[in-house]
Amino acid sequence: MEPIMGFKGLTLDRILELQGEYEGVRIFPNVSPKVLADWHERYPEAINNPKIRMEYNFLSKSLIIQCMPLPTHDTLQTYFNGTILSWLGAKIGVSETMERVTVGSGTIFSRFEGDWSGSSIKLPDAYVQLADTMFPRIVCESGWAEKHAELIEDARLWLLHTASQTRLVIILSFTETFEENASSEMDEGAEENVEAEENAEPKENAESKENAEPEENAEPEENAEPEVSSEGSQGVLDEESIIASIDESTIYNDLAIWLVKLHKAGRLDKPLVGKIGAKLYGYQATQDGRNIEPSFEKTLLPREGAGGGEFPLTLEDLLGDTLPKGLKPEEKIPLSLETLVKLIKRSIPRTVEVRGGKRAEAYMRKKGVWIEAETFAQCKRRKLSRYQG
């Protein structure tokens, strides 16, 4: 991901703006430890600010601002941590598991070997750390916006600069491609549903709900189709018309719902989510400890052949020589790739929803009607829209 501004122009306020506006990460390359140290002197409050999520790798000299994580990005974290904890808990009990390992995510790790300035800071997406060690035994990193080369440099930092404490780095690398006027999650029959709504009779002369007899199988109010604006822009079913209809009465959430609906019907000029590709890698240090090498590589999406299989992980990989009695080091931990693929696919609709909200906000900002706080009139209109047809 190319930087959106020079590092010298980066302020604390701008970092907070980036974290709220962008997804994934923002990478600032060619930032030397000396330049970073000077920046910290200028903004000392950035060092321990809990709102700021920053990483630095002294090998690549890249400063990374962590922005909004998307549901799809977080699937490896969810799957890996959940699987390891549940498997160990079943094998040796929850109490002993907690005594032996820490399974977590987003924790700050620093003081990497060879980093004379102490500038490197990493916040792994997921990790397993043995008790009484400084660094994790296994690290998981996911890349949505990061370049793959940056993820490899992260693996190099973990495997070659932690006194051999980190033995395995698992990388889930995502790609996203867009086809014009094509949706990644096209709902079957969605086109027909949209066209049917476009050709439906107008409701201007329809009897109001207050006077009409209630229908026995009427859809619940919370599931009813939203209006794009408080003026009742029903029937506006293409992106251009929706954008043109945005005004001060537009309700943000209704606009987001319409954009998601158009995405599912393949009616957006650019889909909210493109075609997702995912590839899983395993990296370990070479025997002489001077370099890293791949130990595993498999394409998860698009599927190749029948798919399935497991990531090769043993109890020794996880716990080293500190094995509980009765367990064998070669025992395999079932990291099902099929299950991981299912989680990735399940996350895509949630990513669509997140991006639908961000695009709705962007359109409202562009039309000059976005406000940071809801006015009384908007709040009243939003509540009334729940009960009016």
Image (tube, rainbow, N blue to C red):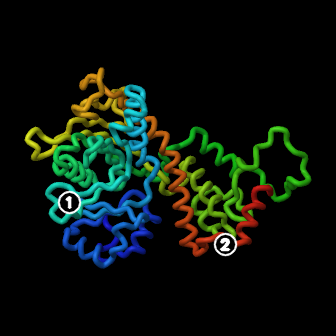
Q: Which residue is mark 2?
A: 248
Q: Is residue 116 above or below residue 175?
A: below
Looking at numbered disc 1 in the image, what kind of residue is underneath it?
Ser
Q: Is residue 139 left or right of residue 105?
A: left
Judged from this view, the residue extending furthest toward the left is 288
Q: Secondary structure at mark 2?
A: loop
For the residues bearing labels 2 and 1, Cβ distance under 8 angstroms: no
Residue 307 appears in the rendering: no
Q: x%, y% of residue 363?
A: 55, 67
**207 or 312: nearer the viewer:** 312
Question: Distance between the Cα atoms at labels 2 and 1?
Answer: 47 Å
Q: Which residue is mark 1?
A: 60
Q: Residues within 10 Å of mark 1 (few under 14, many from 20)?
A: some
Mark in front: 2 vs 1: 1
Q: x%, y% of residue 360?
A: 56, 62
Of the residues under marks 2 and 1, which one precedes in the sequence?
Answer: 1
Residue 133 appears in the rendering: yes
Looking at numbered disc 2 in the image, what kind of residue is underneath it?
Glu
Please state, as top left, top right, bottom left or bottom right, where the N terminus lies in the image: bottom left
Please state, as top left, top right, bottom left or bottom right, where the C terminus lies in the image: bottom right
Q: Residues within 10 Å of mark 2 (few under 14, many from 20)?
A: some
